[in-house]
Image (cartoon, grey):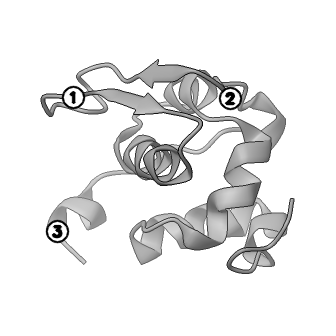
Amino acid sequence: MSRYTKARPCALPGALAELRGPTSGVASLPTRLHWGPDNRYDLADTEDTSVMYERVIREASSALDLAEHLDADTLRRLWADLIIPREIRAGWEARFLELRHRQSGAAA
């Protein structure tokens, strides 16, 4: 784990139901969440969606960032396979026990 991950607080929503981000089309992230050259993600592509969710979860500085860019059902479906720092995963799973029990490839 990096010192950056330890030093940066993890943003969490109050409830998964607050996550009402896009579920289709192409989503774009603001520079504060993705500073690379291509900030667009095709939500029809599971790998693209997973990368976007990983970035948002790692970089979000507020519950509003999470609510605008993540969708609760999509998060539940992808959760077990997301590559996120252990500490961030632990924080989410402590607040949302249903995520803790998600297994890789589990149906929503």
Q: Which residue is tagged 1?
A: 38
Q: Report the front residue among 2 and 81.
A: 81
Disc 2 element: loop
Screen quadrant of the C terminus: bottom right
Q: Is residue 8 above or below residue 17?
A: below
Q: CA distance from mark 2 to mark 3?
A: 33 Å
**Do callouts 2 and 1 mark residues in contact (Cβ within 8 Å)?**
no
Give the residue at x 65% y 25%: 24
Near mark 1 (Cα within 10 A), the count class, few <14, some 14-19 or many ≥20, is few
Give the residue at x 38% y 51%: 58
**Nearer mark to the viewer, of 1 and 3:** 1
Q: Which mark is residue 3?
A: 3
**Do callouts 1 and 3 mark residues in contact (Cβ within 8 Å)?**
no
Q: Quadrant of residue 14?
A: top right
Disc 2 or 1, which lies upstream in sequence?
Answer: 2
> Please, what is the three-letter code of the amino acid marked with disc 2?
Thr
Look at the image and tell me whether residue 11 can be seen: yes
Q: CA distance from mark 2 to mark 1?
A: 19 Å
In the rendered image, residue 18, in percent from the top left (x then y), is placed at 76, 29
For residue 108, side relative to residue 3 (left or right):
right
In the rendered image, residue 1, in percent from the top left (x then y), is placed at 25, 78
Total numbered circles? 3
For residue 3, side relative to residue 70 (left or right):
left
